[in-house]
Amino acid sequence: MNSSLLAALSRIVGRQWVRHRRAELVTYAMDGLPTHESLPGVVVIPGSPEQVREIIRLLHVVRVPFVARGAGTGLSGGALADPDAVLIALTRLNRILRVDPLQRRAVVQPGVVNARLSEAVLPFGLHYVPDPSSQAACTVGGNVAENAGGPHCLKYGVTTNHIVALEVALPDGSSIRLGSLHGEPWGPDLVGLFVGSEGMFGIATEITVRLERIPQSVRTMLADFSTVRAASEAVSSIIAAGIVPAALEMMDRACVAAVEASIYAAGYPTDAAAVLLVELDGQSDAVEAETALVRDILTERGARAVRTASTPADRARLWQGRKKAFGAMGRIAPDLAVQDAVVPRSALPAIMDQIDGIRLEYGLTISNVFHAGDGNLHPNISFDRRDSAVIARVRSACRDIMAACVAVGGSITGEHGVGNDKLDYMPWIFDAETLGAMRAVRRAFDPTELANPGKVVPVHACREWTAVKSTRTPTLRSGHS
Amino acid sequence: MDRRKEHPHPHASLGALVSDAIFTRLRALLGTTGVERDPHGIPRATPESSDALTLVCRLAHEEGWKIRVEGRGTWLPPDAPADLVVSTRALDQVVSVSPADLVATVQAGATLEALRRRLADYGMWLALDPPGRPERSIGSVVATATAGPLRHGFGPVRDHVLGCSVATGDGRLVNAGGKVVKNVAGYDLTKLQVGGFGGFGIISEIHLRLRALPRADVTLVARGTRDALTAAARDLMAADFLPGALELLSPALAAEPEWVLAARFVGIDAAVQADVRRLGTSGDLNWLPLPADRTASFWSVAARGSLGGPVTLRLGVLGDGVDEAIDLLAHDLDEGLVSAGAGQGMIRWTGDAPLERLRALRRAAASREIPMTLERAPWATRRALGHFGAYREGVGAIVGRLRGTFDPGQCLTVALEGAD
């Protein structure tokens, strides 16, 4: 990165917030996915939304690409920057700007850590629902970029269902406001379009989220099964009964073994082929009734045992193993490729068999811990990246798993995003015309394609779309029409 | 042909010639059954497949014809000026229903009623109760994002749409989203189409998220002054009631002497009965359960009420701002046909009002950070005000580029912004 650019960036944020030495950059060379690595040209760490806009304006003038990064917990290589790009780390923009308990809204900066937001609104009896497993570290800005999910999204929806308004720094450095406090779009639903755009439409500098009341009553159940198929069928039966649990998670034998051998041991039965974690919440009478019904369904579907926890301590213990499963897998091997795919719920039993076949074929260790209620799989491959031969097998296995999921009508990602990890898979589920439309939409926000270049849409696979120049549209300059 | 005489073209003979030429070209493309004339004599294409729809759009794009988009003609008045009408009424199939996955794929022209019946056969349910008639097309509901009272418990229209296929103004087919309930592959183009009013293409097929048909579905109503009912609704929210709908209906809309607050509980029997019992012992309102055989008609009458005047609009207001927003309506328009989400907010108004009044309301709402969306109105009103009106600074350029992307020839006659 040339010295004049470094000097200009230093003038904006102060020299101490610009990192350019190799040792400093290594920290930013990966996200949570160990199969991709790239050193950015420079890292700049702004301290205010205005600094973000100034940086972007500068980069727009000199036509240098940039990548936004939160906590770097992403799992698709989405926050990796090439050596010719500037990485903008948003971790200093970590202020909760406003909380309105009455209207159940909070306005936060993008670098606010997900779990910290829920902690901050707890005194009001509220919480922020999307709860990725990385919630103790990941940021709300990163969640917006990836449209992150989490175990409790089955009932309450993913990030896009909880974001009502955004202030966005566009890739030319200008700023726009989208959405409304209510959530009704102000025009076309550009908030909905922006969420999940993986940092390619601009940078959200202020995020207004919807908060939910903490449920009056919560029950968590753990059921263990002799076969994955029986557990999968229990999932379908619960949903078909008209019950939408707050969470409906599955762990297979390999995952349970890893958890129980770790400091996160939660008392899961290690001889089970699969365990289901079912959480019901809501008004207490309703939860009681649903708990009884779900227990019956689990038993009918062959659960060997059903444990129910209602106290916070017992529930936390049951959840501990699930939430820390990825950490527990660190015992198996130094590296973990966390995969993310979605299948129609009805395809769960068959796809689990296929993943097991792929595990055997490549001689890998694969543990499954996933959001069974919405068919969102996380096959996790444990490996050692110092062994180049095993990396090739990991990549091939990931590819085969994705192909199997797509073949049954699934998607290549349910909550981790495409990033650069899944670029090659995009043409498997989208035709050239649709990919071309995506690229054209990106250009509507970022005509120069400087924001997070090279991610999400494989340009080679797009049919070309050429948009006409902007039609005349009225603009609300001061106040309103 | 006689009908056309009632609406003479400024250059009647030339207009008729052009219209006949378009009619002939469309027939060559779609066959004799795929083209008819609308009541004004304008050629109306009724393609039966997404591919046929794209062919019509491509032809219109190449020829520079203006298209009026129609569903089944029950919501927006069919009055936008155009060279041809493209209707989705022949795209009326429920393509697939997967009860195990709670997903259905349906063509855009299918009616809500046909969809409801088909889903019920499988024990499935689409938790949307939009305004209008049961013959309304699902494509119209999605394109206008017109949710009804059930948005309280089940979210706005966008929450029910997993993906859709769209024919762009220049005849490309874009397949946005997918058929699985959780999906972040690529940009969420579906969001642009939900509530896009057809400005970004014509929706041909939709993948919907379903729910199991509720075992119990109970509606209770309370009557009283507006203030008393909105206060009661706030108390219910604070007491953790989770109804599927909690809707405030004006006397005219409910055909009652007083305002009505309606709470609808759906779910498994035991849970619904528990909610009903608890409701009976909370607050001062006298809640009366509707007989089971009257529940559907109660909500249906309320939904049809939105057709009780030529203009329908919605205000994106939060629950605790409902009172003030209705006051605003009463000041600038009237409080005749009003339906309001008493818990989560959102107000729908239907009536008749001159442009100036509507303009004043939008201005007053905007100054309170409340977006006003024109859902339904005669073309003259839509053209003047637009469905959305003016955008905030910087947004108009993006929307303009998006429209240029999805309709480069500006063939789709849709007034998103209006002429104001």
Image (cartoon, coloured by chain):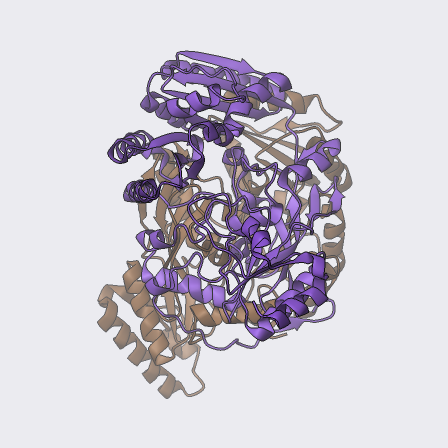
Residue drawn 53% across and 29% down?
A323
Residue A277 seen anywhere in this rendered image of the structure: yes
x and y percentages locating residue A226 in the rendered image:
34, 16
x and y percentages locating residue A265 in the rendered image:
51, 19
Q: Going by the image, does A154 lie left or right of A216?
A: left
Q: Which chain shows up in purple?
A: A
Q: Nearer the viewer, residue A102 or B24?
A: A102
Image position of A187 with respect to B160: above or below: below
The quadrant of the image that shows the N terminus of chain A is bottom right
Residue B348 seen anywhere in this rendered image of the structure: no
Image position of A8 with respect to A131: above or below: below
The quadrant of the image that shows the C terminus of chain A is bottom right
Q: Which colour represents chain B?
A: brown
x and y percentages locating residue A290 in the rendered image:
52, 20
Q: Going by the image, does A472 lie left or right of B355?
A: left
Q: Nearer the viewer, residue A163 or B192?
A: A163
